Amino acid sequence: MISPPAGVIADVASAVENYDRHADAGTLIRSLQEIGLRADPDALAAAAQPYVERPEVAGPIYERIVDLRPNDARALVTLANAYWLHGRGGEVVGELAARAIAADPANRGAWHLWALSESDIRARVARWQQVTARFTDDDLAKAILADNATSLAGAESDEHALALAIGTYEALLSRATVLEQREALEKALNTLRSWAL
C-alpha cells in the first residue's frame, strides 16, 4: 500500500528526529528503507527535500527513488551529491553523474559532479574544460577550472596549464562586478604571472 505524501513526510521527519536523538545510523537506514518500500518517488522526494544536505538521510531515500526511476537525471544527481558528501568516492559518484548526463545532457549539476569526481588532476582539468565549453556562462565552473589548472601547473610545472589558468582568471575578471571578487582575481593573476616554470 502506497502511503500518502503527508504521511511519508511525517515518517521521514520522525526517523530523522529519532536518529538525531540516538545517533543510530543502522536504525535510520532501516527506517528510511521501509518508508521507501511503501512510498512513491514523488512523495519520497518531497520528504527528502529538507535533508538534501544530510547524506545519511538523502542517500537511502534517493537510492530508492533511483531504483524506481533509473533515468531520472535530477534523482541521479541528488544521489551522487549525497554520496559525494558522504565520502563514497569518485568512482561511484562519477558513474551516477555520467548516467544523469546520458538521461539529460543539459543537467549542469550532473556535469559538475562528473568533473569533480575525476581523481587525476590532468583528466579533471580536461573535464572542467568540457563543462565550461558546454556552459559558457558558468562562472563557478570557470573558477574551478582555473583552480585546477593552477594546481596542475604547480604540481607538474606545466606551462600550458599555467596559461589556461591565467586565461580563465582573466575571463572571470572581465565579467566580475563585485569589488572583492575583482581584488581576489587580480591577486591570483599577479601571483600566477610571477611564476617561472
Image (spheres, grey):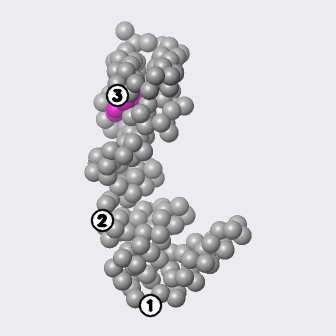
The 10 Å Cα crowd at callout 3, few under 14, some 14 to 19, many 20 or more, is many
Which residue is rendered at x = 41% and y = 73% of the image?
151
Amino acid beneath label 3: Arg
Report the span colored magenta.
60-66
Which residue is rendered at x = 50% and y = 13% of the image?
7
Q: Which residue is outermost to the bottom? A: 196
Residue under label 2, please give it. Answer: 120
Residue under label 3, please give it. Answer: 64
The 10 Å Cα crowd at callout 2, few under 14, some 14 to 19, many 20 or more, is few
Q: Are marks 3 and 2 in contact (CB under 8 Å)?
A: no
Residue 34 at x, y percent in the picture? 35, 17
- Measure the C-alpha gap from mark 1 to mark 2: 24 Å
What label does residue 186 carry, if any? none
Relative to 19, say whether 140 is above or below: below
Q: Secondary structure at mark 3?
A: helix
Q: Are marks 1 and 2 in contact (CB under 8 Å)?
A: no
Of residue 70 and residue 11, the one placed in the foreground of this image is 11
Residue 138 at x, y percent in the picture? 53, 61
Instruction: Using the rendered view, name the quadrant where residue 39 is placed.
Output: top left
Q: Secondary structure at mark 2?
A: loop
Instruction: State which tag comes first along the sequence, 3 or 1.
Output: 3
Q: Secondary structure at mark 1?
A: loop
Residue under label 1, please give it. Answer: 196
Which residue is rendered at x = 34% and y = 68% of the image?
121
